[in-house]
Image: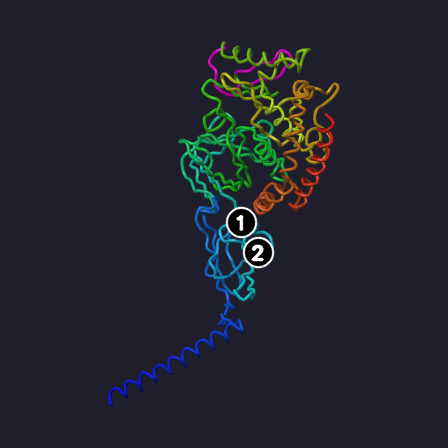
């Protein structure tokens, strides 16, 4: 009986297994024939968890900046110094674009001044738009000084003790310490808005610059745009002129009085963090004011050579400097110039770079030289630079009006002075002319000065308008002064391109 039951059970299980096998094969066949995989549901929503400017991707930041994300708007309060940044964002979007161009978090510089719309795409292709809204803060760093006894700073000769504080406005480091302050400049000291020189009690790195004691505050009273020195320094930097000054816009208060917009920069001097030509190097200034303690007139061109640094102690030291300068000048003036070895004594690249800066800015003070620096390591060549003082450039010379003309540079005929005769001599050397042509082409094709000017207009506009309310320099509408500068630059570059190509 049991044997018959087992046979029936085994038979039933076999039939059931066969049925299941047949069903599974049929199902697999059906799926294969229909080629229809199980449905996958794609997300139709996007979440934007955060939008940030991270210090690691934006070296100009003091700290990370977190934006507010609300109602499809990304909002932040930012200094105008931060208009060009690399944003980071956290989102589950499959793709992110900015004004139609794909954007990757933490990668890609963007201009926050433009109308900026980010598109975040869900997996199913649905787009969610977020508009970037920036509340711009136009404050510049504030330098405030209080003199000992609240005395006025009314001398270029004597320092006054003071306390100094710098409010970096979240863009630069704050600073406080003791300093001395006095006036500076030649003709600029006679103007209503005064320039100043600072000597800190201790070396410090201000605005991220190499630490030193000596600093300068340029008033730029003659400069309606507050950009003329900036353009010259920027050009010199791009050309690779060593020891070129940095330029930091600040607002200044002394003894509680607001003095307006200033340019903070380094003092031109010999030092390892300034003009670094070694302990036995020299810094000369060709300047017709001829007002340094140690100075000489060169033999061939009667150049007014002032020994700026180091401070000499005897006439023998001056004679040694003059002897080396005279060796170089004699070769420049020689009848076999340029087919002599004059370039063993003065650096060719520095001649080309220096002349480009002065030609571009139409700084005609090179003709009767003022503020023309030349440095020399102890055992090296003379090197033109660093560049300095462009208040009277940009068509101002002879007219007292910037942008009045753009087709001039070296003086001719009876107007030709010592600087004209010396510096124009280099344009008779095909090697120097070739360098100028090459460097001019590279500079003008790689840099857009009008973009530079417009960027700085955005940064300076608020402070410039506050400065205008104090000093009434330029037009009420800052844009008018900037337009005049931009038009002059366009015309000047066009004129110089023809002039240089014709050399």
> Is 215 located above or below residue 75 in the figure?
above
Mark 1 lies on a secondary structure that is: loop
Region of the chain picked out in magenta, as a range: 294-315
Please tell me which residue lies in front, 340 or 180.
340
Mark 2 lies on a secondary structure that is: strand
Q: Which mark is residue 108?
A: 1
Q: CA distance from mark 1 to mark 2?
A: 10 Å
* Image coordinates for residue 190, horizontal then vertical, percent: 59, 30
| Label 1 packing within 10 angstroms: few (<14), some (14-19), many (20+) | few
Give the image quarter of residue 247. Answer: top right
Give the image quarter of residue 406. Answer: top right
Residue at screen point 31% across, 83% down: 10
Contact check, label 1 and label 2, Cβ < 8 Å: yes
Please tell me which residue lies in front, 318 or 453.
453
* Image coordinates for residue 13, horizontal then vertical, percent: 34, 82
Q: Is residue 16 magenta?
A: no
For the C terminus, the image quarter is top right
Q: Which residue is mark 2?
A: 98
| Label 2 packing within 10 angstroms: few (<14), some (14-19), many (20+) | some
> Is 30 located above or below residue 43 in the figure?
below
Please tell me which residue lies in front, 495 or 260.
495
In the image, is 389 to the left or to the right of 2?
Answer: right
């Amino acid at each position: 009986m049991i044997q018959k039951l087992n046979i029936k059970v085994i038979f039933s299980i076999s039939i059931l297994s066969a049925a299941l096998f047949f069903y599974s094969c049929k199902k697999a066949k059906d799926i294969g024939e229909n080629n229809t995989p199980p449905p996958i549901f794609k997300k139709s929503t996007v979440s934007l968890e955060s939008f940030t400017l991270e210090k690691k991707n934006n070296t100009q930041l003091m700290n990370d900046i977190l934006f507010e994300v609300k109602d499809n708007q990304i909002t932040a309060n930012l200094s105008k110094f931060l208009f060009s940044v690399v944003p980071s964002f956290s989102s589950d979007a499959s793709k992110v674009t900015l004004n139609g161009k794909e954007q990757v978090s933490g990668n890609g510089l963007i201009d926050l001044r433009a109308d900026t719309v980010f598109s975040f795409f869900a997996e199913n292709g649905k787009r969610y738009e977020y508009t970037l809204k920036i509340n711009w803060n136009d404050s510049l760093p504030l330098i405030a000084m209080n003199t000992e006894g609240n005395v006025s700073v009314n001398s270029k000769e004597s320092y006054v003790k003071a306390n100094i504080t710098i409010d970096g406005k979240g863009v630069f480091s704050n600073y406080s310490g003791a300093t001395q302050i006095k006036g500076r400049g030649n003709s600029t000291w006679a103007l209503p808005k005064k320039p100043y020189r600072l000597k800190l009690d201790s070396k410090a790195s201000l605005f991220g610059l190499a630490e030193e004691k000596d600093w300068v505050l340029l008033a730029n009273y003659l400069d309606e745009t507050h950009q003329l020195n900036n353009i010259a320094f920027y050009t010199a930097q791009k050309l690779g002129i060593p020891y070129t000054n940095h330029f930091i816009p600040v607002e200044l208060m002394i003894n509680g009085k607001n003095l307006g917009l200033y340019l903070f920069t380094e003092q031109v001097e010999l030092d390892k963090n300034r003009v670094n030509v070694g302990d036995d190097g020299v810094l000369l200034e060709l300047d017709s004011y001829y007002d340094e303690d140690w100075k000489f007139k060169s033999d061939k061109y009667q150049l007014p050579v002032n020994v700026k640094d180091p401070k000499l102690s005897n006439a023998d030291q001056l004679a040694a400097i003059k002897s080396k300068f005279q060796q170089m000048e004699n070769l420049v003036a020689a009848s076999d110039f340029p087919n002599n070895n004059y370039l063993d004594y003065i650096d060719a690249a520095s001649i080309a770079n220096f002349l480009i800066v002065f030609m571009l800015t139409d700084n005609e003070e090179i003709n009767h030289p003022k503020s023309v620096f030349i440095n020399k390591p102890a055992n090296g060549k003379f090197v033109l630079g660093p560049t300095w003082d462009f208040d009277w450039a940009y068509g101002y010379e002879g007219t007292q009006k910037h942008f009045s003309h753009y087709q001039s540079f070296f003086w001719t005929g009876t107007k030709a002075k010592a600087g004209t005769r010396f510096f124009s001599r280099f344009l008779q050397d095909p090697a120097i002319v070739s360098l100028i042509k090459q460097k001019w082409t590279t500079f003008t094709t790689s840099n857009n000065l009008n973009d530079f000017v417009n960027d700085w207009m955005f940064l300076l506009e608020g402070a410039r308008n506050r400065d205008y309310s104090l000093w009434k320099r330029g037009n009420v509408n800052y844009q008018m002064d900037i337009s005049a500068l931009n038009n002059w630059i366009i015309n000047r570059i066009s004129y110089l391109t023809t002039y240089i190509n014709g050399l």
